[in-house]
Image: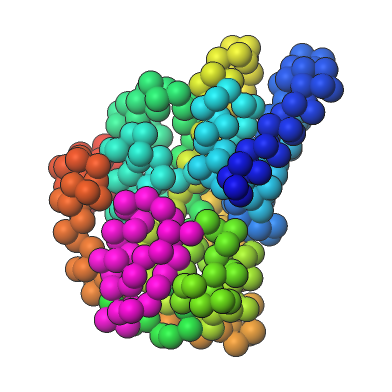
Amino acid sequence: MKKLISLTLALAMIFALCLSGSAFADDKASIIITGTNGPGDTQSVAHENFAAALNELGDWDAVALVSSEMGSTDDVLEQALTGANVVASSDPSRLASYVPEFGILMMPYMFDSYDQLNTLLETELYAKWQQDFRDQGLVLLCNNFPTGFRMFVCNNEVNTPADLKGVKIRTMGNAIAVNSVNAMGATAVSMAQSDAYNGIETGVVDGGEWQIPTIYSLRMYEVCKNISLTKHFLLTCSVVCGDKWFSTLTDNQQVELSDTAVKVYGEAKDMVVEFEDKYLQEMKDMGVTVTEPDIDSFKDATADLFSDMDTTGGVDYNALRVELYKQMGIEK
């Protein structure tokens, strides 16, 4: 029912845009940039910056709607595939259901630093993945925005996987996220991000895993008093739209949309670093305990997932990792 309501609201908004003159009123392309994180989250700020940058070009009527106003990420992806003028901020693990190889970007401990992503968009593999997405009806505009390393958030200190035994952790509803969280010792529970706060407050789950700016913007520090800096996933914002809608744009608008996405989201990395430090200190000041865990124990617990076909969608992630590191110039 919630999904139906979200889709109905989204379609109503799109219809309203059409009533205002058409999706291209006054030769401007109307576009809704969506996100599930709260106000003040780095991802939300980046969406707002993207909308502003497009509007400055003169060919666009862009608006950013965050805090799941357009529904869950999966809801928005469905809208995009049907031809709606929406941009979804997804992630590699979720999009692996369309292009399995792409999921490797969010495998546990795949990357050690944000700077390692600098050359991703220049690789042959990334160009191949963009075409693979087009074949599935999606346009991958960019994936150069690291929104942060994911951390465990709960009410007990987490130093090793043993500390997560019996702990129900909210995570994303895909094989990479669920299997990884389970491998790290917890009991993974798929749950919409908009339901997570209430889920923790009522005991449906014991905690979750998010990046620092999102923990802060969702106010998880109110229901969880411990953050463990496991850095198990490096979450990147995969900015996508539907090919049906993208193909209705002029050639110039297509170029503007793609180039502006790469530029704006690429420039947001420094903001993430700044906000991580700021928000983590604020949460410490509010009484949250920050734990420095044994990272190697979590790496060991998840190492076999690269050869687990249920996690990788049938792709040999060990071989793919070697090739991707080579193309990105990462020495391991």
> Horizontal and vertical percent for residue 213?
58, 63
Q: Is residue 174 left or right of residue 146?
A: left
Q: Is residue 159 above or below residue 48?
A: below
Q: Is residue 288 among the parts visible in the rendering?
A: yes
Q: Is residue 25 left or right of residue 130?
A: right
Q: Residue 109: within the magenta? A: no
> Horizontal and vertical percent for residue 237?
50, 46
> Horizontal and vertical percent for residue 141?
51, 31
Query: In which quadrant of the rendered view does residue 228 lie?
Result: bottom left
The colouring scheme, among rainbow, by chain, secondary structure or one colour, is rainbow
Q: Residue at x 23, y 63 (%)?
A: 302
> Horizontal and vertical percent for residue 57?
73, 25
Q: Is residue 216 among the parts visible in the rendering?
A: no
Judging depth in this view, the residue of 265 and 331 nearest the camera is 265
Q: Residue 170: within the magenta? A: yes
Q: Residue at x 77, y 21 (%)?
A: 18
Q: Is residue 130 above or below residue 102?
A: above
Q: Residue at x 30, y 31 (%)?
A: 125
Q: What is the span of residues highlighted in magenta in the rendered image? A: 162-191
Find the residue positioned furthest to the front: 1
Q: Residue at x 36, y 65 (%)?
A: 188
